[in-house]
Image (tube, rainbow, N blue to C red):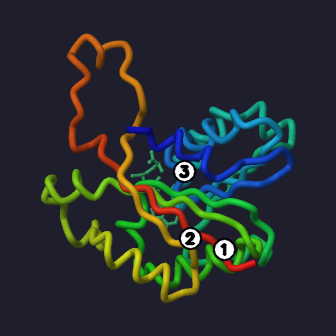
Amino acid sequence: MIGIYDSLQRLDLRENSNLLEVCIGPGVGLEEALRYQGVKVIGVDVSKDMVELSSSKIAQHIQDGRAKVVLGDVHNLSFIESNSIDRIFHMNCCYFWEDVEQALKELLRVLKPGGKMLSAMKYRAIKKGNHDPAIFKNTDPESYLKSLEKVGFVNIESSPVQLQSGCTGINAKLGCPVSSRMHYTAVFSSKTS
Ligand SMILES: C[S@@+](CC[C@H](N)C(=O)[O-])C[C@H]1O[C@@H](n2cnc3c(N)ncnc32)[C@H](O)[C@@H]1O
């Protein structure tokens, strides 16, 4: 099974294209995206600590003008122009959104016609973990897919992936266990051209 970061390849990240990641957390997704030659990244997170942490990890790229990290909320991306983003990625985040449709409307607005989005969630671990519904508000995969369609995303495809492909280091020594934390759902969608 392929890993979630391998799935970024399916976004067809090209030189001089730009990728918006919302909910960057500590910046692992941004670091992965920056491995694609010539791709520019914009990271957005509502937490000042996460913005600072991820900015420090990719400081050289920020200095070189290839990366930008902004404190902001996915429900209101007014600091990003409409139809300006080639690719969008978000992972482990839509559970927390107050209003999934509003957030998706904003993501669709900033996406260029023909642009693609990869959404990744670990629904299995969330279900198993008995998480507080006051914090984890959106944990139903079907409902996320319906919201995508409702706001106007097209070519919606959902498939199971793992956190990482391959098994190395300590995981290999432990016999490559696959915990529910590693089971992700990757949802690809796009904006009509
Ligand atoms: C569980 S972490 C996931 C981080 C990273 N995407 C990952 O998978 O490692 C969720 C992140 O989403 C951010 N977040 C939550 N709600 C948000 C919102 N409405 N807009 C932007 N970021 C948000 C949090 O601050 C946190 O950094």
Q: Which residue is painted at 75% across and 62% down in the image? A: 86
Tell me if residue 161 comes above or below residue 70 in the rendering.
above
Label 2 crowding class (10 Å Cα cut-off): few <14, some 14-19, many 20+? many
Instruction: Indicate if the residue with disc 3 has its beta carbon within 8 Å of ligand 1.
Output: yes
The kind of residue on which mark 2 rests is: Val
Residue drawn 56% across and 73% down? 155
Q: Answer above or below: position of 104 versus 182.
A: below
Q: Do the residues under discs 1 and 2 have CB atoms within 8 angstroms?
A: yes
Q: Residues within 10 Å of mark 1 (few under 14, many from 20)?
A: some
Taking the spot 58% from the left edge, 85% from the top edge, the residue there is: 152
Label 2: state its secondary structure.
Answer: loop
Q: Circle 1 is placed at which residue position?
A: 77
Q: Classify mark 2 as within 8 Å of ligand 1 or not, answering yes or no.
A: yes
- The numbered dot on residue 24 is 3
Taking depth in this image into account, of 156 and 38 the one nearest to the observer is: 156
Q: Are marks 3 and 2 in contact (CB under 8 Å)?
A: no
**Amino acid beneath label 1:** Leu
134 or 126, which lies in front? 126
Q: Is residue 118 left or right of residue 180?
A: right
